[in-house]
Amino acid sequence: MKKRTYCNPVGVSRYTGLLLIMPFIAGVLLFTLYPFICSFALGMTDYDNIRPPEFVGAENYRRMLHDDTFRKSVGVTFRYAALLVPMKLIVSLLAALLLNIEIRGIGVFRTVFYIPSILGANLAAVIMWQYLFTADGLVNQLLGLAGASPVSWYGDPDRAIFVIVLLRLWEFGSTMIIFLTALRDIPRELYDAAKVDGCGSVRAFFRITLPMLRRVIFVNLVLQTIAAFQEFNAPYMLTGGGPLKSTYTVGMLIYDEMFRYSDMNAGYANAVSWVLFVLIAAVVGVMFAVARRGREGDDR
């Protein structure tokens, strides 16, 4: 049998491709895999960033079971994610539907709506947000014009977290872009056929738009959930975790244990980060299981 040969007109070595991706492989090994393994190893030690690590086994994980601050931060993180993620998906989808209308200058409006996501929780945006919700800020001034009493946004544990949620809700641009791209991929013929059959706009939204966006909604749900569980910047800069640690997320606990406390313990911080990783993986795993069961039910 004649051996098959392949044409290689430029004389490229079979190892050229491997050579080209070596920088990426090296980056993954050095900046992802190595820190990942070191973090797990440090989570089994007592380490204060100064003295050599001392192996303590699962002591850091046992400490979490009796750590009221850890349990409080987990509860705050779950509450924050439960408030933010559904609201962000709804607002992003509504904005995408609005910006999917083809009118003159729609590109300008799309850019304007996306700008908050570029700003993020940077210092200027946070200062603006702090002023809006201070005792004599713009929000309370508007409430006064409406005849309502001023609200202590930062002093009430039940309201402080909503200030952070609103800040992150304002940054819906990336989620909106994903929805907008998916909306533009829905065949227009489906809406034309539905209109011929007497289907109104609201019914078309629930019978055509939402089913066609089901997979995109799930992707945005997973991405936003992961981001919400890792929240640190907004509560750190806006409230510092207060009042009464009502906005104290797991991310803030990791930071404090790693850098701020006088008896800081990098080993405990790494252990908490691993627990956070497991929590995120478990929540996302449940989402995939529910989505898979839903698809199997539709197939039947």
Image (cartoon, rainbow, N blue to C red):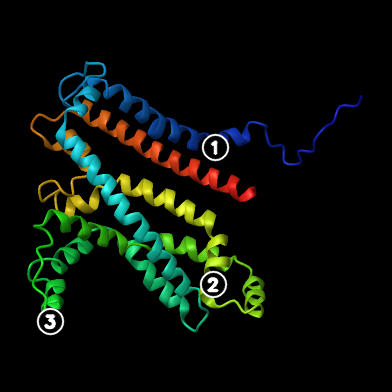
What residue is pinned by disc 2?
203
Which mark is in front, 2 or 1?
A: 2
Circle 1 residues within 10 Å: few <14, some 14–19, many ≥20: few
Mark 3, residue position: 145
Q: Amino acid at mark 2?
A: Arg
Q: Residues within 10 Å of mark 3 (few under 14, many from 20)?
A: few
Residue drawn at 16 percent across, 55 percent down: 158
Q: Position of residue 134 (x, y in %)?
A: 10, 66
Q: Badge 2: how crowded within 10 Å, few (<14), some, or many (20+)?
A: few
Q: CA distance from mark 2 to mark 1?
A: 50 Å
Dot 1 and dot 3 residues touching (CB under 8 Å): no
The secondary structure type at the circle numbered 2 is: helix
Res. 154 image quadrant? bottom left
Name the residue nearer the viewer: 108 or 281: 281
Amino acid at the residue labelled 3? Leu
Badge 1 is on which residue? Answer: 21
| Discs 3/2, front | 2
Instruction: State left or right for residue 181 relative to residue 257.
Output: right
Where residue 275 sits in the image (x, y, percent)? 30, 32
Residue type at the position of mark 1 = Ile
Element carrying mark 1: helix
Reply above or below: 240 against 135.
Answer: above
Secondary structure state at the residue bearing disc 3: helix
The image quadrant that residue 7 belongs to is top right
- The answer to whether residue 150 shows anywhere in this view is yes
The residue positioned 42% from the left and 42% from the top of the image is 284
Disc nearer the start of the sequence (3/2): 3
Q: Is residue 252 above or below residue 118?
A: above
Classify residue 17 as left or right of residue 137. Answer: right
Q: Please identify the residue farthest to the bottom as the structure is shown.
A: 104
